[in-house]
Amino acid sequence: MIAPAIHFKDNCLQAIEFYEKVFDVSDKQIFFRSEAPDNLGISKSEKTKNLVMHSCINICGNYINMSDTLGEVISGNQVILNVYMSSDEDVINAYQKLKEGGEIIVKAGPQIFSPMYASVKDRFGVQWQIMS
């Protein structure tokens, strides 16, 4: 199994909450920096203690890891995720939500490889390719 990881710059928790509204999310686990054992040397300053150290959510049967990083994040290059959905209607529904505050890469519509496909960079800078 391969679980992609997405790194965010101080807004991982908001991204998780957003994706819960877009997709069928289950098995959510979130661990904050403040919860890290003291012997690991993980920064728990006032600025960093409420950042997500590690999270794992299941989106449509696939595990995705997400965390806040103290390093540089260039919006849009963290990872591109392909999500295979059960119906065209599910694709359209996710597309409508993802494009709010985001950027449409490819408008929702039929493609040679899928009856319904769309590509969107969401408001967190993550690019999604959703298809039925």
Image: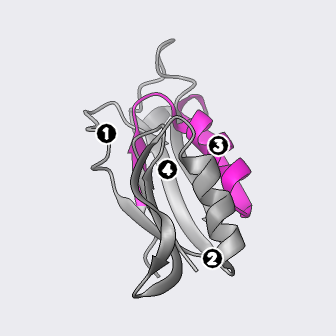
Of badges 4 and 1, the one in the foreground is: 1
Residue 22 inside the magenta-drawn segment: yes
Q: Residue at x 73, y 64 (%)?
A: 24
Question: Quick one: label 3 or label 4, which is nearer the N terminus?
Answer: 3
Q: Is residue 122 visible?
A: yes
Q: CA distance from mark 3 to mark 1?
A: 17 Å
For disc 1, the marked residue is 75
Q: CA distance from mark 3 to mark 4?
A: 13 Å
SS category of the residue bearing label 4? strand
Seen from the viewer's position, the closer of residues 76 and 130 is 130
Q: Is residue 36 visible?
A: no
Q: Amino acid at mark 4?
A: Met
Seen from the viewer's position, the closer of residues 124 and 99 is 99
* CB-based contact (under 8 Å), mark 1 and mark 2: no
Q: Residues within 10 Å of mark 4 (few under 14, many from 20)?
A: many
For disc 2, the marked residue is 85
Residue 18, labelled with which disc?
A: 3
Which residues, given as a range, are shown in magenta? 5-34
Give how far across and how far down residue 130 sits, in percent: 51, 68
For disc 4, the marked residue is 66
Give how far across and how far down residue 63 sits, in percent: 57, 68
Seen from the viewer's position, the closer of residues 17 and 89 is 89
Q: Amino acid at mark 3?
A: Phe
